[in-house]
């Protein structure tokens, strides 16, 4: 590929960019100054970069044809810009933008502010239109602003495409002042989708709560040697902010999948009591060691007034294991496995861990949720865990689950969004409060699918917040 040190590399069939420019685009989130309209003030420059990334200058000796409704969109390296102003969810706009020939556009870059007010048929008609007018394997990007509601309908909108288009990925724009809600750049491709379609606008039970941070970018210290044994440790600096947000001093904090004990250590240093459950014997021992180092046994009369406990057991049995603390636990924060992604040898970090002789998966146990291969069975198992947690939470108790969406075998599994529907749907045990994005700004970028497809480096994860539904 042009721009590589050797001058060789994969043939670039997607765009005309060099290696370095492509790689910078791989990051799954960026921060910008936002305007009064709730979108980045640099939207014109962002739009031109998207057009340059998702299309070539010419195809079959003709300038690429780009459909957009962005008034800021000007010439992009001589491509043929077809600009139709208005919201693409409206039928009138779709009639004006309809091409004479099916599969006319090489790329579509569209902005919508009408998702919250759209109907299922509006969304279905839009994706039909986009599929009909894009060329095969071409991309469409929809810029959508997260609304004021606790549940972001942009999630439901994204997954409603699957009868017509492949949902490929997401890129998130964050307000540098943390005032405005995130803007999503959703990537769709005209290609067959293997996952089932979902209807737009699911029935999510929500409750409003103030002071939830929009995003957190922690700067954790390097891991200690024994902490590397766990494939997915989260930083205490992230947990600190969330524990302080959702609890008061002396409250009981639970991590139902404690790993190496980060949440328990964070709770103790923030003057909270804590209890954890861990299935894996090795991680249990590491967590006990770390907890002791954080709170060593003191002389009589100088003991810490805050308790830290750890139980060896299965999270699905949380209600039985924590029966003595039923109603006392004010907050549960945990990070379950991201499905069975650690069994994917090409997943991020696995090659490096293998070279260092580190453990690639959590365990070989049949009780380990990270070993479940069927996605929907995995979702059901997570629901079982958190239903059990709900039984021991105080009536005003809160729950935070740290997870992310997952790319697997050419499909984009919206694990974070699906989990909200499982737990806060009409028959769920929780109300949804909103989410905080955990953004990793210190990770190196990897050239996934370079030259062929947009596959982001997923450097943002979802901290999903719930309250117990009483």
Image (spheres, helix red, strand yellow):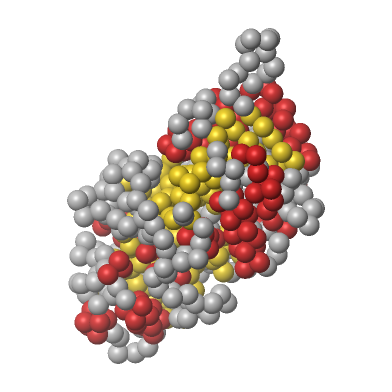
Image quadrant of residue 257?
Answer: top right
Give the residue drawn at x 46%, y 70%: 159
Vertical order, 361 against 307 (above or below): below
Q: Position of residue 350 (x, y in %)?
A: 69, 50
For image coordinates 51% across by 43% down, the residue present is: 394
Left or right: residue 324 versus residue 51 is right
Position of the N terminus by quadrant: bottom right
Image quarter of residue 225: top right
Q: Position of residue 61 (x, y in %)?
A: 39, 78
Q: Is residue 393 left or right of residue 216?
A: right
Image-quadrant location for residue 343:
bottom right
Q: Nearer the viewer, residue 108 or 193?
A: 193
Vertical placement of 301 versus 315: above or below? above
Number of residue marks:
0
Vertical relation: 261 (above or below) 22: above
x and y percent of residue 334 in the render?
58, 45
**Looking at the picture, how far across and down is residue 203, in whole percent?**
41, 68
Q: Residue at x 69, y 17 (%)?
A: 297
Does residue 2 lie above or below 444 as drawn?
A: below
Horizontally, residue 113 falls left or right of residue 212, namely: left
């Amino acid at each position: 590929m042009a721009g590589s040190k050797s001058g060789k590399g994969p043939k670039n069939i997607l765009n005309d960019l060099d290696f370095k420019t492509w790689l910078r685009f791989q990051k799954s989130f960026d921060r910008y100054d936002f305007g009064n309209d709730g979108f980045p003030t640099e939207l014109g420059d962002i739009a031109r970069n998207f057009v340059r990334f998702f299309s070539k200058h010419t195809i079959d000796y003709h300038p690429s044809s780009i459909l957009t409704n962005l008034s800021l969109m000007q010439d992009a390296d001589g491509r043929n810009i077809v600009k139709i102003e208005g919201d693409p969810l409206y039928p009138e706009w779709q009639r004006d933008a309809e091409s004479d020939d099916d599969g006319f556009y090489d790329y579509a870059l569209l902005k919508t502010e009408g998702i919250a007010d759209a109907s299922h048929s509006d969304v279905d008609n839009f994706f039909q239109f986009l599929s009909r007018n894009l060329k095969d394997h071409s991309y469409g990007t929809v810029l959508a602003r997260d609304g004021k509601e606790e549940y972001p309908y942009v999630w439901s909108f994204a997954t409603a495409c699957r009868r017509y288009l492949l949902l490929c990925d997401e890129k998130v724009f964050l307000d540098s002042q943390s005032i405005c809600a995130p803007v999503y750049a959703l990537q769709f491709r005209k290609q067959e989708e293997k996952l089932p379609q979902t209807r737009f606008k699911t029935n999510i039970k929500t409750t409003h709560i103030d002071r939830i941070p929009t995003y957190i970018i922690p700067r954790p210290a390097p891991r200690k040697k024994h902490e590397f044994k766990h494939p997915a440790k989260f930083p205490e600096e992230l947990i600190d902010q969330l524990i302080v947000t959702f609890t008061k001093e002396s409250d009981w904090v639970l991590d139902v999948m404690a790993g190496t004990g980060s949440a328990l250590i964070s709770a103790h240093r923030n003057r909270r009591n804590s209890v954890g459950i861990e299935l894996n014997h090795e991680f249990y021992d590491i967590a006990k060691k770390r907890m002791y180092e954080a709170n060593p046994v003191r002389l009589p009369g100088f003991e810490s007034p805050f308790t830290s406990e750890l139980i060896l057991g299965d999270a699905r049995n949380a209600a039985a294991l924590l029966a003595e603390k039923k109603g006392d636990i004010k907050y549960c924060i945990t990070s379950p496995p991201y499905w069975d992604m650690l069994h994917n040898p090409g997943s991020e970090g696995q090659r490096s861990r293998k070279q260092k002789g580190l453990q690639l998966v959590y365990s070989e146990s049949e009780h380990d949720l990270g070993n479940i291969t069927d996605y929907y069975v995995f979702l059901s198992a997570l629901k079982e865990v958190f239903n059990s947690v709900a039984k021991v939470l105080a009536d005003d108790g809160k729950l935070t689950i740290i997870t992310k969406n997952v790319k697997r075998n050419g499909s984009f599994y919206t694990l974070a969004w699906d989990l909200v529907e499982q737990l806060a749907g009409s028959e769920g045990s929780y109300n949804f409060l909103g989410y905080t994005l955990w953004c990793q700004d210190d990770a190196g970028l990897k050239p996934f699918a370079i030259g062929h497809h947009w596959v982001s480096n997923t450097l943002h994860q979802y901290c999903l917040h719930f309250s117990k539904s009483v």
